[in-house]
Image: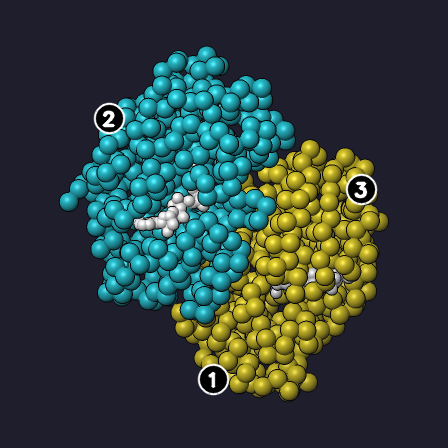
Chain colours: A cyan, B yellow
């Protein structure tokens, strides 16, 4: 069995622990009880159909044996479940199951289930307890920071809240069933956390890319621990996304535009931001940062199995247009997160549109 | 012109001012700007059809003259607008109008508009600024405390958040158009704030009942100032409703049950809690508090035009049943807010059901 890791996300009275390890789901009962999750009030487990088949029975069994009363809601897999409609169905379910102010909502799944269930927890009776059991690599990102949300037909993540979990249980065993494309997509955010904060961790990812792709538990445990730690460090300094937290958007301005233009589905979020991070590295270099940023960024992302080239059929005008709609352009200013060295970025509010356009074109010719 | 009053709701970095006065709407431009509401980002005014006819033109004119850009959403009047459906329509409107993270939502109306618009402000982009312009007396209650919510078909106020406004503008002139029944219903919460906290204010209400019913601006301004002050004092000590805040529920356990059993509409909320407060006074006396609590409670409420007798056709069993479903019965314990003297209450968790039942019967025979 691989090493067990624990991390505290420091947020004053809203601080919470993240437990990372193989088979940790077996200890869910004790860990939830230790964090004050009530056995007297019913809890609601939220998961999706694919995950339910693989990992729900164990969770239900463990919680029942520990004396918790849990009802389960299973939503269809995929982004479309992050809707107000499914949100309302979950509230109905919570009411019917008699959840009260001491109840908890438990999210067993990836970012979709986490965001959705988290918004239910944030809103039900104006906020009840929330437990995250992430089952994707990408969800290491959503398990830190307390951002929860559903989508509106006109905009992603536009309806939401900040609602911190009581605890996060990361069982590495559950990740073994992840499809390879989801593995790589999740690793994009892991690499991102290195690129914005920690040069040594970028080097580690570079060397251990193969082990990560093969889901080696030791490597994965370390990578998730580091990824969560970086995000926690950023979020602790800026819980409500006033300034610093913006650096977490490295690669996301271009990435979101690609997702929008490609139509959600063609590119996974992690794939889109992989291309976006290569673009950001290119911008950094053009603005005077060392050349190696670009080479290293591209190499690490390729090694974990991510695309680094922008699909040629995506129209440059449409991409530029989509970027102008991105909410990061507050009141018309154009802001980019730009690398200045490996493991360091700056928030640059004066990146010219002409340069961004050139970079988008260059990304289509990426070798 | 009557006296101008100002009050600060003390909530650390979330503290905000309430301005109370005749014609204060004319100063909305300066007051909003002084509190940092952006003129660069569009704002959304939410109001209902009845209020729109009476008071919207002035607000729109004042804000426009001050250089704000505002779009308006007008919802149907009444509790049914506090739904997820209308919530979603407002989010759509906000998106279409281009509201960004620096935008504000302005609620012009009673508690319905305040709760609804406040939940939109709490959720849109995970929380934007919120301004309350209450136009009912009852809304003095909802303008302090930051509770915002919509209803679910199975439960009132079950989907919501805590989201404090940036400021509250209480223009006494807008209250002049209130129907008499709404005036009395609003005064129920004013009297409640006296009964839980301030004996002298109860005496003042007793003496000034006539002036309040006639909407005398000076009396009204003072009463709203006092009502808001009491609520602010309670909320400042217990922002997230952990313990003390429960005293604000004086009369509400019986009141909510009456609303539910009568069918929403027969009894206004204020009318139901008026009867509930008489019931609580009776319980207090039965538990040993001075007799006069009952006499004074009943007299003040009658004087402001509120019912104190429980409609006989409402079934006692149904009322008892409805109380058992009230969310204040956490994990089965039966809790009542019980007066101990005029201006003072206690949270009593061991009121027997038999006693409550007797009191419900007595309330039907109230002279
Ligand atoms: N809240 C935040 O801070 C934050 C941060 C990043 C991303 N997100 C959100 O996260 C979402 C994406 O998350 P995601 O990539 O985890 O998506 P996801 O939850 O849709 O999971 C991806 C797919 O993998 C399947 N799956 C999940 N776990 C599995 C497992 N262990 N074995 C086999 N299959 C499994 C799911 O059924 C799904 O089909 C987006 O909605 C995004 O907005 C939120
Ligand atoms: N958030 C809180 O802390 C809190 C506290 C108490 C009540 N509430 C909520 O408040 C709501 C009740 O508030 P309310 O009684 O103000 O109801 P309301 O907003 O429905 O207003 C009552 C009626 O008066 C009309 N009206 C409003 N202002 C008027 C004016 N100036 N002139 C003429 N007509 C006017 C409205 O159109 C409506 O028909 C409930 O939904 C309740 O849950 C919330
Ligand atoms: Zn991302
Ligand atoms: Zn009330």
Residue at the limit of the structure toward the right, as seen here: B1
Q: Is residue A367 left or right of residue B212?
A: left
Q: Which mark is residue A243?
A: none
Q: Which residue is mark 3?
A: B62
Question: Is residue A192 positioned above or below B252 on the image?
Answer: above
Residue holding disc 2: A207
Residue A346 versus residue A267 in the image, above or below: above
**Alpha carbon distance from label 1 to label 3:** 56 Å
- Residue appearing at x 28%, y 26% in the figure: A206
Distance of label 3 from label 2 (alpha carbons): 63 Å
The x and y percentages for residue A342 are 36, 20
Mark 3 close to ligand 2, CB under 8 Å: no
Q: Nearer the viewer, mark 1 or mark 2?
A: 2
Residue shown at the point (30%, 32%) measured from the top left: A304
Q: Work out whether residue A166 can be spotted.
A: no
Residue at 53% across, 58% down: A85
- Distance, label 1 to label 2, CA atoms, is 73 Å
Q: Is residue B113 visible?
A: yes
Q: Position of residue A160 (x, y in %)?
A: 52, 48
Mark 1 or mark 3: name the one nearer the start of the chain. Answer: 3
Dot 2 surroundings within 10 Å: few (below 14), some, or many (20 or more)?
A: few
Give the answer, above or below, for where A187 lies relative to A112. above
> Mark 2 falls on what kind of element?
helix
In the rendered image, residues at marks 1 and 2 fall on the same chain: no
Q: Position of residue B66 (x, y in %)?
A: 78, 36
Query: Which residue, given by chain and number where applicable, does mark 1 sit on?
Result: B354
Label 1 chain ID: B
Q: How many marks?
A: 3
Residue A72, image x and y in percent? 37, 63
What secondary structure is marked by label 3? Answer: helix
Q: Residues within 10 Å of mark 3 (few under 14, many from 20)?
A: some
């Amino acid at each position: 069995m691989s090493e067990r890791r624990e991390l505290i996300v420091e947020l004053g009275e809203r601080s919470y622990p993240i437990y990372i390890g193989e088979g940790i789901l077996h200890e869910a009962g004790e860990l939830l009880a230790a964090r004050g999750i009530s056995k007297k009030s019913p809890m609601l487990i939220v998961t999706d159909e694919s995950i339910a088949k693989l990992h729900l029975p164990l969770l239900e069994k463990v919680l029942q044996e520990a004396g918790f009363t849990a009802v389960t809601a299973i939503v269809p897999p995929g982004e479309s479940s992050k809707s107000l409609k499914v949100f309302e169905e979950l509230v109905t379910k919570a009411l019917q199951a008699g959840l009260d102010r001491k109840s908890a909502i438990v999210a067993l799944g990836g970012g979709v289930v986490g965001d959705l269930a988290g918004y239910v927890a944030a809103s039900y009776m104006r906020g009840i307890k929330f437990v995250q059991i992430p089952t994707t690599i990408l969800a290491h990102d959503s398990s830190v920071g307390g951002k929860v949300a559903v989508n509106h037909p006109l905009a992603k993540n536009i309806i939401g809240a900040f609602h911190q979990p009581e605890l996060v249980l990361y069982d590495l065993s559950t990740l073994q069933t992840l499809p390879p494309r989801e593995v790589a997509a999740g690793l994009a955010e892991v690499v991102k956390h290195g690129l914005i904060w920690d040069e040594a961790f970028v080097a580690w990812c570079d060397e251990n890319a193969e082990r990560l792709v093969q889901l080696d538990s030791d490597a994965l445990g370390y990578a998730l621990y580091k990824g969560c730690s970086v995000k926690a460090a950023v979020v602790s300094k800026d819980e409500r996304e006033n300034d610093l937290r913006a650096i977490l958007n490295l690669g996301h301005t271009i990435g979101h535009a690609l997702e929008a233009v490609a139509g959600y589905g063609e590119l996974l979020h992690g794939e889109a931001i992989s291309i976006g991070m290569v673009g950001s590295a290119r911008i950094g270099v053009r603005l005077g940062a060392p050349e190696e940023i670009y080479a290293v960024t591209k190499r690490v992302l390729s090694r974990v199995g991510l695309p680094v080239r922008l699909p040629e059929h995506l129209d440059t005008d449409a991409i530029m247009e989509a970027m102008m709609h991105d909410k990061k352009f507050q009141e018309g200013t154009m802001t980019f997160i730009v690398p200045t060295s490996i493991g360091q970025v700056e928030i640059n509010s004066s990146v010219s549109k002409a340069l961004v356009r050139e970079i988008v074109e260059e990304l289509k010719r990426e070798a």
